[in-house]
Image (spheres, helix red, strand yellow):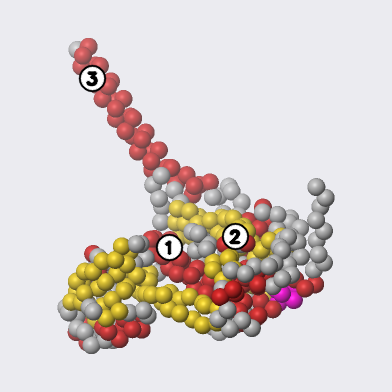
Amino acid sequence: MEDTRHMKRASRIVVSVFIAIALVYGIYFLPLPLFIFSAGTAEDIQPMVQVKQNDSQDHGVFMLTTVRVSDATVFSYLLSFVRPFEELHLKSELLQKDETEQEYSQRQEVNMLTSQSSAIQAAYHKLSIPYKITTDGILIVQVFKDYPASQILKPGDYIVKIDDTAVQTKEELQALLKNKQAGDTVAVTYKRKKATKTDSIALAALPADEGTAADKPQARRAGLGIVPANVQSVKADDETRQVKIKAGDIGGPSAGLMFTLEIINKLLPEDITKGHKIAGTGTIDEKGTVGVIGGIQHKIIAADKAGAEIFFAPKDYVSPDGQTIKNYTDAVKRAEEIHTAMKIVPVGTVDDALNYLNTLSPKEDKAS
């Protein structure tokens, strides 16, 4: 009897331990279908932008700003209701159709590469530096599930050849597959990190919104079932003016404006920051137009924590369908809520930012 009681007690202890472990895992580690948005960081861009010939003496800094996006657990979900300025978003709001979180990250990486290319072009355009565009290859952003290619290809791979034909752009890839039929097999040479491989992959009918006749698969265009993106480089005619950007793990397109300003600063002999700490955000196109972004209210907090004196915010924008995106208004509101002394400056072009910088008085260095 005594042994039986001991065994029952031991069993209850074991069960209790397993229940406790399950509860801890469920509360602290089990991800919910939600993202938590909060203030990220304000990063000094100077080390990220490299120019072969750099004669500038910079005393101030330009900073890009980020939003922290984290998986929600039960614990962090509950905390978000008492932590100021955190926001909850369904993952489905960010992810495209059938897109995985890995593919979302890859898409953000492509957006960052595109943003860097546009920033370099905008700076060259502003400074009248001749340049040309070269194509570096085809990057896979997404692989559709249930396609044969999904068993072989991954987001981040580069397509190098189809059968024996080298390809450098997604347009060339589409042209090679144009006359193929679903069920045909092609030899795909692709590069993954430093390794190059070749595999035979069967083609399949692409989704109806990419082809035709949703009810007639045989009439739809055949393909690998991937979302490709062209990766390009901007080459200055004068090699001493060549710019390279290395942003590490930061993704998304919203650092375009700040990259452009830092590139211009590197290519000019004078310091256009005039010794000030300047943060900001905004997409950029090759002509220098600043576009709206998401999460600006979190970036204001990040910039304030980093000690920024000035913050460039995209001007409020009304889209063709009448939707208003209030980047500047939202930035001012958050700045007032956190009682920052940081100056919020609305910009619609890189010229707006440069004109404002021209009005600044040089900041005197403090004696050490």
Element type where label 1 sits in the image: helix
Q: Residue furthest top?
A: 2
Q: Report the amino acid beneath label 1.
A: Ser
3 or 1: mark nearer the eye: 1
Dot placed on the residue nearer the N-terminal end, 1 or 2: 2
Residue at point 24% right, 21% down? 8
Q: Is residue 317 magenta?
A: no
**Residue bearing the label numbered 2:** 47
Q: Which mark is residue 7?
A: 3
Q: Which image quadrant is residue 339 in?
A: bottom right
Q: Are marks 2 and 3 in contact (CB under 8 Å)?
A: no
Element type where label 3 sits in the image: helix
Instruction: Give me the C-alpha separation between circle 3 and circle 1.
Output: 51 Å
Residue at point 47% right, 57% down? 35
Instruction: Give me the C-alpha separation between circle 2 and circle 3.
Output: 64 Å
1 or 2: mark nearer the eye: 2
In the drawing, does residue 153 fall left or right of residue 294?
left
Q: How many marks?
A: 3
**Residue bearing the label numbered 1:** 105
Dot 2 crowding, Cα within 10 Å, few <14, some 14–19, many 20+: few
Residue 294 image offset from top left, x and y in percent:
56, 67
Instruction: Give me the C-alpha separation between circle 1 and circle 2.
Output: 23 Å
Dot 1 crowding, Cα within 10 Å, few <14, some 14–19, many 20+: some
Element type where label 2 sits in the image: helix
Q: Report the amino acid beneath label 2.
A: Pro
> Magenta stretch?
352-356
